[in-house]
Image (cartoon, rainbow, N blue to C red):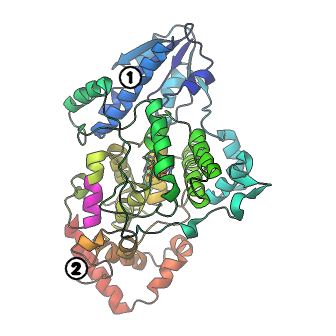
Amino acid sequence: MTLLVLGDQLSFDYLAALGGVPGRDTILMVEDPLLVARRPYHRKKIVLVWSAMRHFAQECHTAGWEVVYARGGSLADLLAQVQGECVCIQPREKGIRPLLQASNVRIVPDPYWSVTPAEFAAWLIVHPNPKLEDFYRWRRRVSGVLMEAKKPVGGAWNYDKENRKPFPKTHQPIPRFIVPPDTITQEVMQEVAQLPKLTGSVEGFDFPVTRMQAQALLTDFIAQRLALFGPYEDAMSAKDPYGYHSLLSLPLNLSLLSPQECVQAALDALAQGTAPLASVEGFVRQILGWREFLYQLYEAFPGDYHQANALGQNNPLPEFYWSGDTPMHCLSHVVRQVLESGYSHHIERLMILGNFALLAGVSPSALNEWFWCCYLDAYDWVVTPNVIGMSQFADGGWVATKPYISSGAYISRMSNYCKECVFDPKDATSESACPFTTLYWAFLIERETDAPLSGRMAQNYFGLRGKSLEERAAILERKKGLQKLR
Ligand SMILES: Cc1cc2nc3c(=O)[nH]c(=O)nc-3n(C[C@H](O)[C@H](O)[C@H](O)COP(=O)(O)OP(=O)(O)OC[C@H]3O[C@@H](n4cnc5c(N)ncnc54)[C@H](O)[C@@H]3O)c2cc1C
Ligand code: SF4
């Protein structure tokens, strides 16, 4: 039997789920040249995937497996040469599935998801307007995670009120867990540095590429960051790109770690008293809740998710998303950081990069392509529902209950970006008005009669009622003057 292992399926649990036996079966792995041909991905992303694949192939070989590892070549051609049965874990990306079907590859369910597509389909019948909260409580009840006698541990399902704080003035960044590149990674870095038409540089690549390194990252996160993860989940700082975030999306999305073990590690910290419930619950919600919820919604989305555009937004992506060259300090800083490292945390993705694009009427698919190219953890199944759904509301509310938009006041409250900016976050109309603030009010004014939106955003529209006709006209006038920021 041949076990096809895709680039994001680097798990010995998967080999067991496929029923493989070392010494009897063969593992087939292919460095897909399409990965670099499809779009101008970040070079560090290619290094991450190829280095992790080469390390995994080596570990399998050491464990007694016969491994056929193709550097380049067409997967279709390689599959055509396979003798006997070929099996593969259900790929998360929909794009590759027709090829596997045409090649008669037998598909085995992915044990890292807690819900099967059939179970989720049945749940959707009862919840036709799916909400994270309902899904999350369902998964907590079924798994027993943070449950006691059928009630949530601590008496509440979430502790958001205790969370969502900005960093205090005394905040000091914790050094990030880094993995100096070994010989295999250095080799990949040299190869990828030569590839044309990609984004960013390979220089400074220092992320986990093996399961052992990923486990060490998890241990480091639990020891150093989890305790304060909850309170500062939404905090942003120009001096600290990571805060108390884990960076676990990189190894999780390659299957170097399972979501179950990440949740268990947080539960152990709670049991040992090294992290409070508010932080542990906040982290569990991200993995057991958001991560799986978005995957299931990606699977179940009716139609082509990439083209969804419920708000009819068609402006091109501003050029500064590829350079960071803009006077808006928050955007300039975060864009440069992403182009350099391939990472920013959730709130910067949602409330700076996504927020601006939504307020500026950018085409959701153009923004999705940008995220897909630039982030090291981006794969269709997770980037698309996050960008098209959560961030741009372009799926009409399949993922999010309302558009995530804010004025500069939110960014000012949650970060220190505004202190070094030429714009004033409180101002919507003058020459020094913060573009977020102008565009936020303009968005509400222009969509005031947009019933599906106004119904979901009552609080935002309530604020608009206090604006006089003159003020509204001045906001729209200022918006015209912002065209040059593109
Ligand atoms: C516009 C936008 C684009 C995004 N694109 C991606 C993407 O390409 N790949 C990706 O993995 N995540 C994406 N996310 C979700 C989230 O921002 C990242 O998972 C998170 O920032 C990864 O950093 P971390 O590991 O430090 O996260 P932490 O804050 O430490 O969270 C822990 C884990 O929870 C999971 N998680 C939390 N929120 C989400 C979510 N909304 N969707 C999926 N998993 C979640 C991740 O696995 C993450 O590692 C996106 C969010 C937005 C708003
Ligand atoms: S003032 Fe506006 S543009 Fe400047 S950093 Fe603050 S939110 Fe960003």
Does any portion of residue 394 appear in the rendered image? no
Magenta span dominant secondary structure: helix
Position in image of residue 69 (x %, y %) = 40, 16
Q: Give how far across and how far down residue 247 sits, in percent.
A: 43, 46
Quickly name the residue at label 1: 54
Is residue 135 shown above or below 232? Answer: above
* Horizontal relation, residue 107 to residue 143: left or right: left
Percent x, y for residue 118? Answer: 69, 40
Q: Is residue 63 magenta?
A: no
Q: Secondary structure at mark 1?
A: helix
Q: Quadrant of the N terminus?
A: top right
Q: Which residues are magenta?
A: 328-336
Res 160 quadrant in image: bottom right
Identify the residue under disc 2: 432
- 466 vs 362, left or right, is right
User: Pointer 2: residues within 10 angstroms few (<14), some, or many (20+)?
Assistant: some
Q: Amino acid at mark 2?
A: Ser
- Nearest to the observer: residue 187 or residue 71: 187
The C terminus lies in quadrant: bottom left
